[in-house]
Amino acid sequence: MDRRRELKEEYRLMKPAMGVFRIHSEETGKCYLEGTTNLRASMNRAIFQLNFGSHPNLELQSDWKKWGQKSFSITVIDELPYNEDDTSTDYKDEVVELKEIWEEKLKNDGFEFY
């Protein structure tokens, strides 16, 4: 029984990777950025939504339906580290700021966005 309690505590203390990921269309060159406090879960959710036609970005959804998943790359473009002192528990503002930085960088590199 102690092992079960130990595993629950480990899970509770787990810190998921957070940052910004990009869905890039090889056909149009456009990209979609999303900042999140849980990269893996958000990437899985976006793929699920796109495959089932329920993604909130209608232009991205239309291109996904037209060309399929094989025409898109999905990559983590930056991860946000946790604070060393572990006093901050809400990283939403930092994630939003990181996304805005990447939007600006990619815009300067000539990328268009969904």
Image: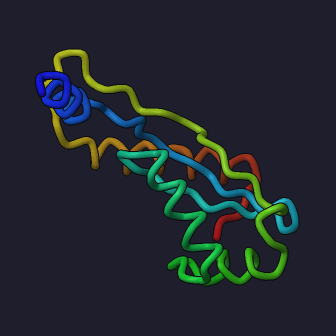
Q: Residue furthest top?
A: 84
Q: Quadrant of the N terminus?
A: top left
Question: Where's residue 13, x and y in %?
Answer: 21, 29
Q: In which quarter of the view is residue 98 placed? A: top left
Q: Residue at x 31, y 32 (%)?
A: 15
Q: Residue furthest right?
A: 27
Q: Residue at x 75, y 81 (%)?
A: 65
Question: Where's residue 108, x and y in %?
Answer: 68, 48
Question: Where's residue 27, x and y in %?
Answer: 87, 66
Question: Horizontally, is 89 left or right of 110 in the view?
Answer: left
Picture layout, residue 27 above or below residue 89? below
Q: Quadrant of the C terminus?
A: bottom right
Labels in figure, total = 0
Q: In which quarter of the view is residue 30 placed? A: bottom right
| Colour pattern of the rendering | rainbow
Question: Where's residue 24, x and y in %?
Answer: 73, 57
Q: Residue at x 16, y 29 (%)?
A: 9
Seen from the viewer's position, the closer of residues 61 and 102 is 61
Q: Residue at x 55, y 45 (%)?
A: 102
Picture layout, residue 19 above or below residue 88? below
Question: Horizontally, is 37 left or right of 69 in the view?
Answer: left
Seen from the viewer's position, the closer of residues 81 and 97 is 81
Q: Residue furthest front?
A: 1
Question: Horizontally, is 19 left or right of 12 in the view?
Answer: right
Question: Horizontally, is 2 left or right of 64 in the view?
Answer: left
